[in-house]
Amino acid sequence: MDISPLTLNRLSVYLRCLRRLHEQEVAYVSSQQLALQFHLSAAQIRKDLTQFGEFGTRGVGYRVAPLLDRLTEVLGLDQKHALAVVGMGSLGSAFARHIGGTPDGPFAVAAGLDSDPQKIGKQIGGILVEPVSELSQLVPERDIKMGILAVPAAVAQETYDLLVAAGIRSILNFAPTRLEKAPEVHSRNVDLRIYLEELAYYLALSPALPA
Amino acid sequence: MDISPLTLNRLSVYLRCLRRLHEQEVAYVSSQQLALQFHLSAAQIRKDLTQFGEFGTRGVGYRVAPLLDRLTEVLGLDQKHALAVVGMGSLGSAFARHIGGTPDGPFAVAAGLDSDPQKIGKQIGGILVEPVSELSQLVPERDIKMGILAVPAAVAQETYDLLVAAGIRSILNFAPTRLEKAPEVHSRNVDLRIYLEELAYYLALSPALPA
DNA sequence: CCGTGTGAAGCTGTTCACAGCT
DNA sequence: AGCTGTGAACAGCTTCACACGG
């Protein structure tokens, strides 16, 4: 099955909505209702959902529980994922804490790594900091599949290469650099500076609030 | 001038490249060279750049310095931007530290706010934590235009509304919720959970590394 | 009658190919 | 000769409109 990244991100949003409906013990929901409540497009929801089989009942809508289960399964959220946070600076440790705060979720920080000898051995955000050099041992040992790359831009590429060599298959990259990517590894960039600059543009565009 | 968000984000990337070339005292660069060095598409670079006037010299390429200046100006990065970080939890304080680490850049954290009385008055990441309730005074006082929303999802909407009411025009939102947006305020969502779920999908898609 | 499922239409963004300038 | 600037083809995504089934 091949899902476009845009659809994929919408699925996450749908899931969030469905979880809420499920908690509220809503059994059925129509694309209309979802669209109105969560500011989505009804047609798009239907298009997206039909990719995984026909779930809806015409004239009624979708049954919340099975749809929730199916999407959870599609996204691979029915199993636990061990992840490594590489670079335990402010961003990395914030991320580790963030994940650590939702232990019921499918993600768990299995290792926090850094190259700074000062940090190694310390507990940061409830995670023991271990040396990056042990990556290749820790990854198979703890069955780590995902990596969070939160190192300075200058060492991002080499650290990325280390992660790939250690066998990590999915990387979330916070370093503001375009990486030379390995073909089998999926990565997603989150570049805070780009986002800030985007905001700056919109400020420059319309500097004054209509008073 | 109206720039699409996609183009806008690419401009940030171009700027980064141009800054580097400028440091290396490269005077001219062609779209080809930019494309090869930074893994972009030459045609796209040209298309993007022509939106701001004709900068290139045919047969030669682009002069780095003027292009750098122009793009910097277009994105509004030739002026300082004071921003407020709202929610000084792990994510907010990491962000504050992050910005604080580049004091030469156009962005400066002018206020770190939280609603937790325990945190107020403390220094976190070099920023004094002040109460959210003072937002409406601090924003005009310190000429704050941008806000970083890093509060829990449950209070994201009300905090967003507070920011808007205080006169903030651009918001970077880390809360995993779709917000009811005010029309004049530009906001950008950064939803870490969605990114993680995206990565999980790609893992589920091809679980085994070709050995 | 109501809501899903879906081809067709419309739109946005990217790539191509080449004319035109230096 | 080389590289920009650009219309035209192309691709991907979204919206529309309606046939179909409960």
Image (tube, coloured by chain):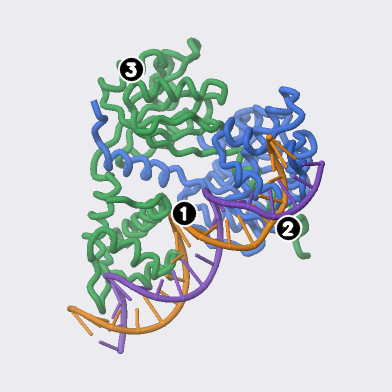
Chain colours: A green, B blue, C purple, D orange
| Mark pair 3, 2: CA separation | 50 Å
Q: Secondary structure at mark 2?
A: loop
What's the amino acid at mark 3?
Ser
> How many residues crowd mark 3 within 10 Å: few (<14), some (14–19), many (20+)?
some
> How many residues crowd mark 2 within 10 Å: few (<14), some (14–19), many (20+)?
few
Do marks 3 and 2 both belong to one polypeptide chain? Answer: no
Do marks 1 and 3 both belong to one polypeptide chain? Answer: no
| Mark pair 1, 3: CA separation | 37 Å
| Residue B121 is at least partly visible in this image | no
Q: Chain of mark 1?
A: B
Residue drawn 27% across the image and 42% down it: B205
Where is residue A155 drawn, in percent x and y? 53, 20
Q: Secondary structure at mark 1?
A: loop
Q: Quadrant of residue B2?
A: bottom right
| Residue B207 is at least partly visible in this image | yes
Image disc number at residue B162: none
Residue that carries the numbered disc 2 in the rendered image:
B1
Q: Compare marks 1 and 2 and give the one earlier in the sequence.
A: 2
A97 relative position to B48: left or right: left
Residue that carries the numbered disc 3 in the rendered image:
A136
Residue B13 versus residue A63 in the image, above or below? above
Q: Quadrant of residue A140?
A: top left
Residue A162 versus residue B11 in the image, above or below? above
Residue that carries the numbered disc 1 in the rendered image:
B177
Q: Chain of mark 2?
A: B
B154 relative position to B83: left or right: left
Q: Secondary structure at mark 3?
A: helix
What's the amino acid at mark 1?
Thr
Farthest-out residue, top: A117
A121 relative position to B52: left or right: left
Residue drawn 30% across the image and 47% down it: A75
Of badges 1 and 2, the one in the foreground is 2
